[in-house]
Amino acid sequence: MKSIQELEEIRQKTLQKLNVRKDRSGTRIVVGMATCGIAAGARPVLTTIMDEIKKNDLADVVVAQTGCIGVCRLEPIVEVYKPGEEKVTYVHMTPEKAIRVVREHVMMDKVVKEYTIGAAEE
């Protein structure tokens, strides 16, 4: 059993780690990994994104998973957050599309418009 003091130390260390992540100024890529996303193929999309980030040595990019994004019919969904820019939501993602998003949007600042939720809704 941990003492109150030990628990408080663990709490403080955890909060410091969370603050480090929160203060990052780089790009954040979020993949919807709820049941609907996984069933639609989100796991290979997530793996491909992580592989591309590693292959291109992109140290300022964080990849995260989230639950349901709320538009199950458009899964797999990937959201890209770049500092100072609006979030871009990509839908019906595949590993091949994920490679293009990392290379064009993340690395070259060129949104792949035909994969976005706006293009899908037209």
Image (cartoon, rainbow, N blue to C red):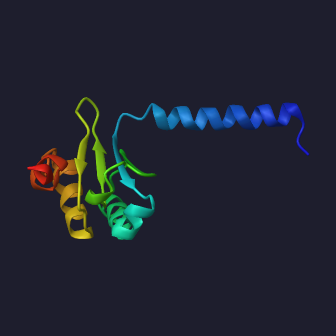
> Residue placed at 33% from the left, 52% from the top?
58
Q: Where residue 22 appears, x then y in whole percent?
A: 47, 33
Residue at 85% x, 31% y is 5
Residue 79 in the figure: left or right of residue 112: right
> Residue 121 versus residue 83: which sits nearer the camera?
121
Asked which quadrant contains residue 4, the reply is top right
Which residue appears at 88% of the width and 42% of the height?
A: 2
Give coordinates of residue 77: x percent, y percent.
30, 55
Q: In the image, 88: left or right of 5? A: left
Left or right side of 39 for 112: left
Q: How many marks?
A: 0
Q: Is residue 70 left or right of residue 66?
A: left
Task: Check the image and report above or below for 8 versus 33.
Answer: above
Residue 70 position, x and y percent, is: 36, 48
Out of 36 and 23, give the one closest to the viewer: 36
Residue lying at 27% horizontally and 38% vertically, measured from the top left: 82
Residue 28, position as x, y percentages in the image: 35, 44
**Residue 30 vertical placement versus 38 (above, below):** above
In depth, the one of 99 and 71 nearer the eye is 71
